[in-house]
Amino acid sequence: MLTLAIKKKWFDMIDKGEKPEEYRDIKPYYNSRLAPHEGTEQEIMLRNGYSSSSPLLQITALVTKGTGNPDWGAEEGKEYWVLKIKKKKRVLPETFIIKARKCKRCGGLLTSKQAVKDGYGHVCKIKANKEKQEDQIQQLCLFDSDET
Ligand SMILES: [Zn+2]
């Protein structure tokens, strides 16, 4: 799913249903993400901030082009990518989801903030890192034997 960063002001207005459109500049960064979906309804994640605990809003929006409403952040007469919001729902940030609070390796409950962020308990993190290294060494060995 496409994720777009959004300012708090617009995030809150969309959340409250006060802003049914979101605008993005017509420039390569957005063209590459939005042009393939022009004319279709897409599920898009709006994120206010860049951390894993940033508030999220999942929207279903029609991707189109046109001018926007200056009250909602658009410049008068300028053409934008316009996301016409049909549906919206608040989504819990990753770190607040119960599933993410369990160790990915042993399923044990994670109690520290760092562990929740890593997805592993302290001991499992060390073990998982070691396993990853051994995996890489094995892959290297396989690669070497292919060469000869
Ligand atoms: Zn564990």
Image: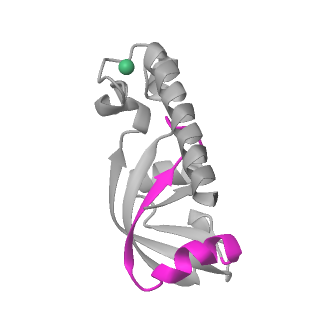
46 to the left or right of 144: left
Q: Position of residue 11 (x, y in %)?
A: 50, 51
Pick the residue in front: 30 or 144: 144
Tell how many labels: 0
Tell which of 144 and 15 is nearer to you. 144
In the image, taking residue 27 as reference, residue 81 lies left or right, namely left
Which quarter of the rendering shows the C terminus? bottom right
What range of the chain is rendered magenta? 26-53
State whether residue 79 is above or below residue 74: below
Which residue reaches farthest front?
Answer: 148
Q: Residue at x 62, y 64 (%)?
A: 73
Question: Residue 64: where, in percent of width, then height?
Answer: 49, 82
Determine whether 87 is above or below 7 in the image. below
Q: In this rendering, would 133 be left or right of 40? A: right
Relative height, residue 56 to residue 20 (above, below): above
33 or 135: which is nearer to us? 135
- Residue drawn at 57 percent across, 33 percent down: 133
> Measured from the top left, where is residue 16 in percent x and y?
39, 51
Q: Quadrant of the N terminus?
A: bottom left
Residue 147 seen anywhere in this rendered image of the structure: yes
Residue 35 appears left or right of 95: right
Asked whether 38 falls inside the magenta stretch, the response is: yes
Figure check: 147 above or below 35: above
Residue at 54 percent across and 54 percent down: it is: 10
Give the image quarter of residue 106.
top left
